[in-house]
Image (tube, coloured by chain):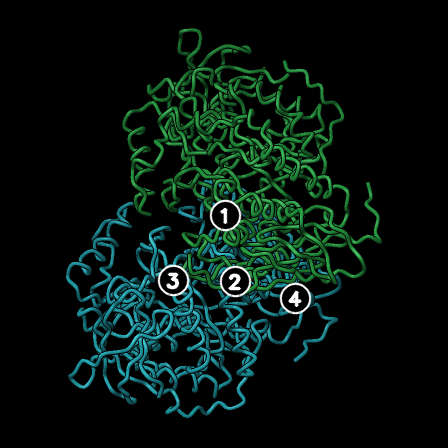
Chain colours: A cyan, B green
Amino acid sequence: MKPVRLWAPHRRRVELAAAGRRHPMRPAEYGWWQAETELDHGEDYAFWVDDEGPYPDPRSLWQPDGVHGFSRRLDHRRFIWPDVGWQPRPLSSAVIYELHVGTFTRTGTFAAAVDHLDHLVDLGITHVELMPVAEFSGRRGWGYDGTALYAPHHAYGGPEGLKELVAACHRRGLAVLLDVVYNHLGPAGNYLECFGPYFTDRYRTPWGKAVNLDGPHSDEVRRFFVDNACMWLRDYHFDGLRIDAVHAMVDLSARHFLEQLGDAVRALEAELGRHLVLVIESDLNDPRLIRSPQAGGYGMDAQWHEDFHHALHAVLTGEQCGYYRDFGHLADLAKSLRRGLVYDGRYSAYRQRRHGRPADDLKGHQLVAFLQNHDQVGNRAGGERSSHLLCPARLKIGATLVLTAPFVPLLFQGEEWAATTPFLFFTDHRDPQLAAAVSQGRRDEFAAFGWPPELIADPQDPTTFERSRLDWQELRQPLHTDLLDWHRQLIRLRRALPSLNDGRLEAVAIRYDEQQRWLVMTRGAATVACNLAEQRQPVPLSVAGPSRILMSSDPQSHLESARLSLDGPGVAVLLAVDRHLAR
Amino acid sequence: MKPVRLWAPHRRRVELAAAGRRHPMRPAEYGWWQAETELDHGEDYAFWVDDEGPYPDPRSLWQPDGVHGFSRRLDHRRFIWPDVGWQPRPLSSAVIYELHVGTFTRTGTFAAAVDHLDHLVDLGITHVELMPVAEFSGRRGWGYDGTALYAPHHAYGGPEGLKELVAACHRRGLAVLLDVVYNHLGPAGNYLECFGPYFTDRYRTPWGKAVNLDGPHSDEVRRFFVDNACMWLRDYHFDGLRIDAVHAMVDLSARHFLEQLGDAVRALEAELGRHLVLVIESDLNDPRLIRSPQAGGYGMDAQWHEDFHHALHAVLTGEQCGYYRDFGHLADLAKSLRRGLVYDGRYSAYRQRRHGRPADDLKGHQLVAFLQNHDQVGNRAGGERSSHLLCPARLKIGATLVLTAPFVPLLFQGEEWAATTPFLFFTDHRDPQLAAAVSQGRRDEFAAFGWPPELIADPQDPTTFERSRLDWQELRQPLHTDLLDWHRQLIRLRRALPSLNDGRLEAVAIRYDEQQRWLVMTRGAATVACNLAEQRQPVPLSVAGPSRILMSSDPQSHLESARLSLDGPGVAVLLAVDRHLAR
């Protein structure tokens, strides 16, 4: 195994604590220190810096006792990967499934998740996306407060469990993406600042100090995150990463961190001979981030398509609070489907400024679309899923548009059967002051919107976590199996019809009537007709030639002189009959 | 004249103070207010907002009584421009002269500057660049602390005086650039925050709060600066702007402020039918800023070439403090001449991180090169010019390289005759607390480098300003006329030889010997041979065919078998004799 190393550029004495002793480390180049003592796989260790400590290793691969505990040495070579020759499907034909390891199953571990992979395969999922798994404070959490960024969470099953899960996915033909958070660290267990200038106060983020990406010593800080990304892809065989909130990573240097990350991952891809993807969450509506480096872009493969989500959610629910006030018209939904970005330089009332810029060169495959995700559900006071807010027919409209849109569709765990369980915000901080602050913070956040405190689930209460756990028994009930079938059929249709997967925004034909509340989208042979009104109404189709109804939320729906009668609200998928359903 | 308008989005009552009364203004769209009362040219006015005031107009065109006084209405149409059909030379064949209105002449006014324009024409200058003229606190100042950004400083002669100066320049074929500061406002007289969210604390700059370019209400803040730029170009007939420290303008929105500014100025150029240029000062070494929008760039025309300056200064002076520690090798100077950026992604010891990125597509005309400028001189404890630090021979090496380099050369006022006057940092704050803080700040800044406080000129002391004033009598002394001739000859040569003005970095041939301390640059027919050693030595030339010495700092220098003997230090310009000197 390689010797233990530590970057601590401003420290004058660094010691390795192991086997009950402190061993001096010797300074190496660029602020690094190296241990003289050899440590084997499984040995515990920590660091003392200028007589402060013991602190866990910032690059610890294994924190068996949590964020505050000793680090444990791990030899990645001990795991024998069974997925030789594995290649993931391209993102352009992907259907992503976002899951939270802790609540996906009854025991909430990597191992338990394996038991439900066949369900995902049967549904037609191609890519599993794990919410962050890096070690965070306590046993329960969403994972965005991780602090030991190289260590898979001990409560989920640690490094070995994660590798087994990825291998099990690959065995079933499922690619696996990992959500990583590089814009901040959690409030508990962040020892990075004991070692070096990982953070800066020159920029402010919603979570405090920004990561130091362009100040003195930022080369090593950037390398810390780039190496982290490469570790997941190399040593855990992940097929790609979803990078959280990149707009909170302020980097004014000439080469943006994301470009550096993109270059490193492209190099790794060549080295490993395996396709890798980088998907970002960005609040900027800036196409530069997902353009190729050749076009002056940062080279990310795709970004989450928030505008589509907001447009769809606002149309389906009628909600107008917060950022939904910028949406609500069918015109927005139509624009998102045809042009990608809705806010492409136009004025946003929510942001009180112009937002975004045009992106006429984008492919649909550069945008990941969803009716809901962990944030959209979990950041509501009651953790309500779309199925809590919408009747089944409207839910089907949403599912149909997500799964027939020109984007890469993403489902959030349980969405496929309209799980009744909420997905609440939960934490497990052990520091009483921090725990109280988090609970109070959640109450205050929603009190501002008029929610009575007693209705706000306490993030620290273990039952908040328990309530958020999927109940797989629901899958036996007819309403749930009906929705599951609906999703399964749509995914099969998407796979079967090349035009649904071509990502060509310019080939999306849309007609809608803002007053009558209907919208019709045609993509090649397939037409999706949506009645968003409350009453039954004929939806005019402009399909060339005869077509037949392939799926409908309304069993009574029928075609008459290029009009589809649909009970409101409802949705039907029609197929031009002179075309073949390629399989 | 247009009605008086004011942007004050969060105010509930806005009044116009004029003719001894307060007149209510009525709210208009997007947070604007409009006066019902008509005001004519020459009338004084101010604003009251929610009963606070009176405050000057943020867009005041005229502050006859300084930053705190009433604003005065100005009708730009009253000035009859005599420069009909005026077109400036392109930047690619420009020689820029930076001047500070207050110290350029004995009286320090726009009008007085006119008296010395013929000197500039005779020297061969094509573009005059005025240090900022926007109204700043007091009567003496560099101008970077301006707060009434639309009003030419009253002590310089106000709007009328400035127009006369620009017209006088154009009459002589001189283009005029203006230095504008959009990254911060000065500490005294900044009333912007009384009116709206012009600033943000999400980002920190060396001068405090950053300008709000991407937060709520930033559309109007951006417009404030864009409109300002357009005003100078349209209403004062400036031929371009030099934009101060754009790295301190933090804008994470999808369309960077500079892109918006570039688009606006390109549109104005089309409207006016007059060539306009935008030059930036940038600390980022990011070629994106000066690439075309088509190539994903921000569309600025050129940027100040700090790397060349630092490389040249460090080689000539041997200084190694501050940012000069990143330079000092002939290799750096050679790289800056051949590649543009020296720091193109390589590690900077001064910044303690990698800096910049490669820019192989740049033209030399996109970089403005200088041996000194107001900052490099004025930010020294003693305000020392290069001529205070270097012997005349080394000074000639510097001048020769600047004026034969593939970049756009810039001289700082008095440089052409090696003025003996320093250029010190001076201010004229009237607020005693601020005045004391500025004086103390200056002492502390240099005390950190070991300078005794008594040697640091007090910025507030009027003699500091007086000492910085050019002494035109010096031009009668032989040493000064010799240097003036040297500069004049070089500029003539640059004009005469197309290869010196082609901006082709790839056509620059350089040889140097780091140990022997000589450097030879060949650009077409011209060869510049520099001996940077202290002793006389032969400098090997690789000029094809016979050549002759056109200029030399060493009257004894002579050619012998492709070696030029040069007393050290010294410089000579040679010309291949089989080519013609095109005139």
A310 sits to left or right of A377? right
Residue marked by disc 3: A217
- Co-location on one chain, circles 1 and 3: yes
Identify which amino acid the numbered label 2 is placed on.
Gly
Residue in view at x 19 percent, y 61 percent: A435
Disc 4 designates what residue?
A526
Name the one closer to the observer, B105 or B520: B520
Badge 3: residue crowd in 10 Å (few <14, some 14–19, many ≥20):
many
Residues at discs 1 and 2 both on one chain? no
Badge 1 marks a residue whose secondary structure is loop
Q: Are marks 3 and 2 in contact (CB under 8 Å)?
A: no
- Quarter the N terminus of chain A occupies: bottom left
Using the image, tell me which numbered label, if any, was put on residue A328.
1
Separation of marks 3 and 4 at Cα, in angstroms: 54 Å
Q: Quadrant of residue B110?
A: top right
Q: Are marks 4 and 1 in contact (CB under 8 Å)?
A: no
Instruction: Name the image quarter holding residue B452.
Output: top left
